[in-house]
Amino acid sequence: MGRLNWVRLVVLGLFLWAWLGTASPMQAQSDVPVVVTVRLEGALNPIWQETLKRAMRVAEDRGAEALILQLDTPGGQIDVMNRLVQQIRNSPMPVVVYVSPAGAMAASAGAMLTLAGHASAMAPETSIGAASPVGGQGEDIGETMESKVKEILKASARGLTLRRGETAVRLAEEMIENARAVSANEAVENGLVDVIASDLPTLLRKLDGLSVEFGDSRRTLNTAGAIVVEVPLTFMEQVLVVLANPNLVFLLLSIGVQAILIELSSPGGWVAGFIGAVCITFAVFGLGILPVNWFGIIFLVMAFILFVLDIQSPTHGALTAAGVASFIVGALVLFNSPNIPGTPRVSVPLVVGTGVTIGMVFFAAVAFALRAQRAPVRIGQEALTGQVGYARSDINPVGNVQLGSELWTAENADPATPIPRGSRVEVVRVEGIRLIVRRVN
């Protein structure tokens, strides 16, 4: 009995040792800080709001020390910028805005996002600034409206940079008033950003021990040796980002309108209408993201009206050519008029090629329509003449012929030359309910 108790104590000791051995590393690992990072590239768009919200949720669940927002943007709409600034300032953890990689920019509205971070950093050879407001199509806005927008933006910039000193405040105001832009070194020298870091590991080392204002207090960042958790874009976010490409939006708009016109011209099906509705829905989403000139829509609508009118016109060709020209001008005005640096533009060869293709398609449609209108009307027995079938039996001189889905009694037009079974035959004429046929190769 004593020996049994001794064995039990040994086994219990082994289990206890194993548990302590596994628990200690877990405890040690829980002491390692976690940093969550998310990358936002391209023009500001509403998709960023959901991406940033998801990244903040991940950071909060992991108890992250900070959220690093890697930014590269030419700017975007002011209303989207304001919502993103609010998300950053109300974040449950410090947000570090990192303009990267080398050659990236935080231009226009992107400069305000950088200033909104609780800490900010830039990679070498990056730039920030040029935050003067422009219209939705990149054009200069009226003097009164420009003054109002600039004043409210400067007030926001002062509030975001007040903790950085008077030099940083003046530089931020110049970015808005005079569209000034500065390099990473100039931004650090003026106190506009905190550090310059060539990559993420370097950034984590330089942020370690940095004191930042977070809420009503200050917090010291502990990022040395932190575990980096990257939050990638979801599949749907990637799809929506792709839809922000003006070339794709242009193609979707072109295909969608053509499909809808096909559905209206020959109702009864659903494939063309469904494809058209889906393409136009995605195109409208892209138009809501991209800075576009809506005056181009007028030219595009005019182009398709001219195509339809050409079908009904007694003379054909001139309206189609005018429609192609209107289509090309409308597409170029729609996407290529914005004057915002870095915003993508639609390919001119793509526009011209698509316009010519659409013109050829409509011209072909007109040609087929005219041919159908000019073809003689054939009904009843007359419609059988000239049709081709095949012999279901030897025709010598009488046999059976398969014509379409019907079986007919047929007589050989040349009784001296029998027609073997399986041969192709052509209807020469119809006599009552009997077909007169001849063999064809």
Image (cartoon, rainbow, N blue to C red):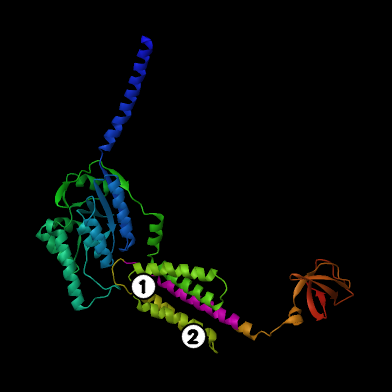
- Compared with 312, 230 (above or below) is above
Residue at image location 21% in from the left, 53% down from the top: 121
Instruction: Locate residue 84: give its quadrant.
Output: bottom left
As for residue 363 lying within the magenta part, the answer is yes
Q: CA distance from mark 2 to mark 1?
A: 24 Å
Where residue 215 appears, x then y in whole percent?
17, 52
What secondary structure is found at the residue carrying circle 2?
A: helix
What residue is disc 2 on?
A: 319
Frontmost residue, 79 versus 428: 79
Number of other residues with Cα within 10 Å of mark 1, as a class: few under 14, some 14 to 19, many 20 or more: many
For badge 1, the amino acid type reads Phe
Instruction: Locate residue 140: give its quadrant.
Output: bottom left
- Compared with 290, 227 (above or below) is above
Number of other residues with Cα within 10 Å of mark 2, as a class: few under 14, some 14 to 19, many 20 or more: many
What residue is disc 1 on?
A: 335
Q: Is residue 189 visible?
A: yes
Numbered tag placed on residue 278 in the rendering: none
What secondary structure is the stretch in magenta mostly built from? helix
Q: Tell me the quarter of the image containing the N terminus.
A: top left
Where residue 81 appears, x then y in whole percent?
26, 63
Q: Earlier in the sequence, mark 2 or mark 1?
A: 2
Q: Tell me the quarter of the image containing the C terminus.
A: bottom right
Extent of the magenta region: 343-369
As for residue 72 lying within the magenta part, the answer is no
Where residue 116 appears, x then y in whole percent?
20, 58
Where residue 365 appears, x then y in whole percent?
56, 79
Which residue reaches farthest left? 166
Q: Is residue 49 left or right of residue 362?
A: left
**Are the residues at dot 2 and dot 1 in contact (C-beta closer than 8 Å)?**
no
